[in-house]
Amino acid sequence: MPRAGLTTDQVVAAAAALADEIGFNAITLAELADRLGVKPPALYKHVDSLADLQHRIAALAMSEFGDAAGDALQGKAGLDALTALFAALRSYVERHPGRYSATIGAQFHGEDDPLFIAGLRMITSIRAVLSGYGIKPDDLDHAIRTLRCTLHGFAVLQAVDGFQWSNDPDESFTWMIKFADAGLRATGGQPTIPGRATSGSPRRPDAAQSPPPLQRK
């Protein structure tokens, strides 16, 4: 039965859920229309094309992750903030692997693009974490990219069941956070604290005036 009063937000949310279910690259407008109970032409009242829909999914995912990271970082600094950031992304990718894939390589279109706005908020959160380590301004871009690559690699590999060795991925995750913490402390000229453990068990769990392009982070 056709859906009455369908909104653009509902269309994008349904597409994001479908991406998590069947994979981002498997989404088609015909598949989405069938899921929503409408004819494919009805979707063009809400999106311009499949590419436009994919872009909107990326913006939604980046916004959701920004919310999750912001909540996780509230009141934390240093290692506690780093642990919270890593755990937030790991948890988000595990729950939403399809829509997260939409953010990989997504290009924003101007500073009023929701993807740019959400991405800038995410970068600002990462910079806030790094501020607790005394990272120099000239090193911020490199530190942000390093953290993103580390987080992305672990989370995506886990999402596709890439850890098939005997060691517990949770233990590797904790080790990775300690490794990143030690590296950031060394880069920021802070003393490393031997044997310091992360707070709890992170299971499934001042932005620059002219920020560099998000897609290049």
Image (cartoon, grey):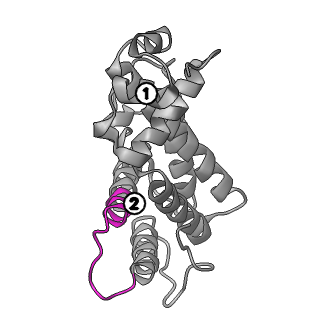
For the record, the magenta segment spans 152-168
Residue furthest to the front in view is 1
Note whether residue 210 is visible.
Answer: no
Residue at the spot of label 1: 34
* Residue located at (44% from left, 40% from top): 18
Q: Earlier in the sequence, mark 1 or mark 2?
A: 1
Residue 149 in picture, x, y percent from top left:
32, 56
The residue tagged with tag 1: helix, strand or loop? helix
Note whether residue 136 is visible.
Answer: yes
**Quadrant that contains the C terminus:** top left
The residue tagged with tag 2: helix, strand or loop? helix
- Quarter of the image for residue 206 reads top right
Answer yes or no: do the residues labelled 1 and 2 have beta carbons within 8 Å? no
Residue 99 in picture, x, y percent from top left:
43, 42
Residue 190 in picture, x, y percent from top left:
49, 72
Residue at the spot of label 2: 151
Residue 169 in picture, x, y percent from top left:
39, 78
* Residue located at (48% from left, 20% from top): 113
User: Is residue 36 shown left or right of residue 52?
Assistant: right
- Quarter of the image for residue 66 reads top right
Residue furthest to the right in view is 75
**Quadrant that contains the N terminus:** top right
